[in-house]
Amino acid sequence: MKYLSIFRVTSAAFMIGGSAFGQSPRHTITHEDVWIMKRVGAPVVSPDGKWTVLSVTEPSYDESKTVSDLWIVPTNGSAAPRKLTNTKGGESGVEWSPDGRRIAFSARREDDSTSQIYVMNIAEGGEAARVTSVSTGASSPHWRPDGRAILFSTMTYPGALTDSANRAAAIERKGHKYVARVFESSPIRLWDHWLDERRASLWIQPLDPSGPARDILAGTQLVKNPGFGGQLGSAGESIAATWMHDGNAIVFAATTNRNAWTYGDVLTALYTVPASGGEPRKMTTDNSDYGSPKISPDGESLYALMQPTDSKTFHNSRLVMWRRGGMESTPKIIAGGPDLSVGDFEITPDNKTVLFTAENQGFVTLYRVPANGGETREVGATHAGALGGLSVGGTTNPIVVASWQSAVHPAEVGRIDLNTGKWTALTHFTDDRVAQINFQPLREFWFTNSRGEKIHSFMALPPNFDSTKKYPLFVLIHGGAANMWTDNFGLRWNPHLLGAPGYVVLMTDYRGSTGYGEKFSQDIQFDPLRGPANDLNEAADAAIKQYPFIDASKQVAGGASYGGHLTNWLAVTTTRYRALVSHAGEWDLETQWATSDYNYDRERNIGGPPWDTVSLWRAQSPMRLAANLRTPVLVSVGERDFRVPMNNALEFWTALQRQKVPSKLIIWPNANHWIMNPEDSRFFYSQVHDWFERWLNGPSPTGMSGA
């Protein structure tokens, strides 16, 4: 194998073009440092560009004492942030009114049975006023361009045309004497909850004059389609929508083939519907997936994100555009493709440029492209961290605001200079606590694998690192697989907290990861576990060869979700690791396909359904190699996890016990795919540390003596 190594230190401060912050660290990172750290949300810039609103969550181990409120800060940095709300529940979906005097958001206040839309007058001050009273709840508010109405999303019952009909349907279902879930098509559950017959819909709440909210999709043939629905995500179902510039029509994304969930791609198309109601008209007719529609400030162009669908298991997102008058035509691809996947995007107020973020080799970077298409260019040069929550305001000159974070600094909100790429912090909620922690920025490590591909890793070094000493190596495996290790401050698998006992933590972007071009992400197809695992082992070999401070005789590994899948594969294919930690890991490819809430893409990734003669279903299923189990494993799973159901962990546990392999099983009754309860999280980290300490001290339990 050829080793080509680059070992670069990422800057502890951020300037898309480079700059520094930093104070002397003091103590080894603790779970309290990670969990109690204030969490700063995405900014939303006012239309004139003078202000930005953001959420700030102040966590507590007693979840009843966690608070989340909205704050406001001038974008020129002339004053510190000030708090706008002071309530028990948090706010979401903040949007400024077109005149920049008010904000709308979704919240569930003390007297609300469900979330409702509230409006706060920023110019005049005062408390927020509730403007909706919908029995099914209201979220994702969007102001009409004249500011006299708000579009929002809610979940409605089949055939219910009004709020009173929805209320009656809910009461009728609660009155059933039986308790049963009945389905005639998939999907039936998602992440941690069972689905029901309700579907997302779009409603309009008049403000001036006020009146009852109305469902603009009610009674249409579109919603009567058995496959109709919005986008399904970890937060539930939603419909991405935007007003046309004149306020007379709405563009939204929805699907009509959701019932193809288990045997094909569920595609969302773009539709237009008059604001007064009527039958929606389908805009997009190709075999691609569309979402996130946005109208340019002048109303002349419509932009959206698009992902092609074909026999490949993964595609990057493209930014596409239609001009007014040609909304029925094939869209023009503006940015993204084989090299980049478009994330957040915004059109500048002068209608000349589209700004967007994209993953790029472990970082999340800002790019710009002419609004009508042309050369994509990076804004500045990113050497650290990850941007998020891109927001743009201003009248002629763009005011660009985004959050930024790194592995050694949680997210803060700042302003970006488009000329220099410099990011200047507007908030400093976490600075004091960060300055007390003894950690250093991630280091980068590249090597060339046995297939001739360059593979990227981050390294997190232990506290009080001394290059003359020897440290155990923790191979930390990300989930996905369509994901990448990002230079950010994570809660669930924080590398510095995991390495706090004194480990070098190696985070490798194996084949199948994003941020390295579309082909690299697709390379996992027909090789779901063996190839990525080879990359992990070869990365460990390369790091051991390159860096003498790594103790080759003391290696451990672990991960969650797809990282758990790979951990289980390592358990049956190598004895190089002294111990493993597997959370939400797949054990049997066939039972995972059959019981997960997400099925078809697994089938496509293998090459056919399990009953076809596709050898991969067995050849790369850890369960089929259970006779090879030797390495001690800590197995962890959330009882409410429907993405990688608990049966996987129980099957793995049974195999470990049957083979008399040292093992521990932790089941989290209240957790889903993620361990998000604060005390559960604290216990999890302690168990990982205890498990590795147990097997790193003393002779190797598998007889491994080196790399």
Image (cartoon, helix red, strand yellow):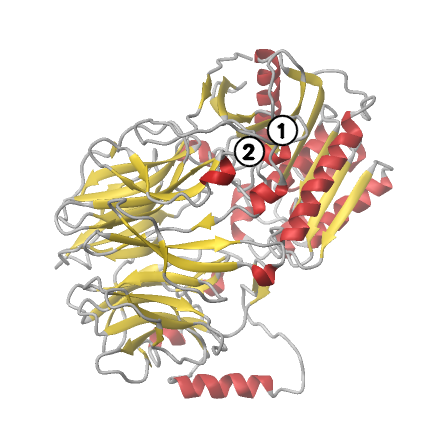
Question: Against 26, is 135 above or below?
Answer: below
CB under 8 Å between discs 2 and 1: no
How packed mark 1 is, by other alpha carbons closer than 10 Å (few <14, some 14-19, many 20 or more), is many
Q: CA distance from mark 2 to mark 1?
A: 23 Å
The C terminus lies in which quarter of the figure? top right
> Depth check: 56 or 220 in front?
56
Query: Label 1, on which residue?
Result: 475
> Depth check: 607 or 28 in front?
28
Q: Position of residue 256 (x, y in %)?
A: 39, 66
SS class of the residue under badge 2?
loop
- Residue 364 showing in the rendered view: yes
Question: Against 389, is 174 above or below?
Answer: below
Q: Position of residue 4 (x, y in %)?
A: 48, 13
Q: Is residue 17 rendered to the left or right of residue 40?
A: left
Q: Position of residue 58 (x, y in %)?
A: 51, 54
Q: In terms of image quadrants, where is residue 426?
A: top left
Q: Residue at x 33, y 31 (%)?
A: 15
Q: Is residue 392 rendered to the left or right of residue 633?
A: left
Going from N to C along the chain, the mark reached first, 2 or 1, is 2
How packed mark 2 is, by other alpha carbons closer than 10 Å (few <14, some 14-19, many 20 or more), is some
Q: Residue at x 52, y 46 (%)?
A: 37
Mark 2 or mark 1, whichever is nearer to me: 2
Query: Label 2, on which residue?
Result: 437
SS class of the residue under badge 1?
strand
Q: Is residue 461 rendered to the left or right of residue 289?
A: right
Q: Position of residue 636 (x, y in %)?
A: 71, 46
Q: Is residue 439 rendered to the left or right of residue 213?
A: right
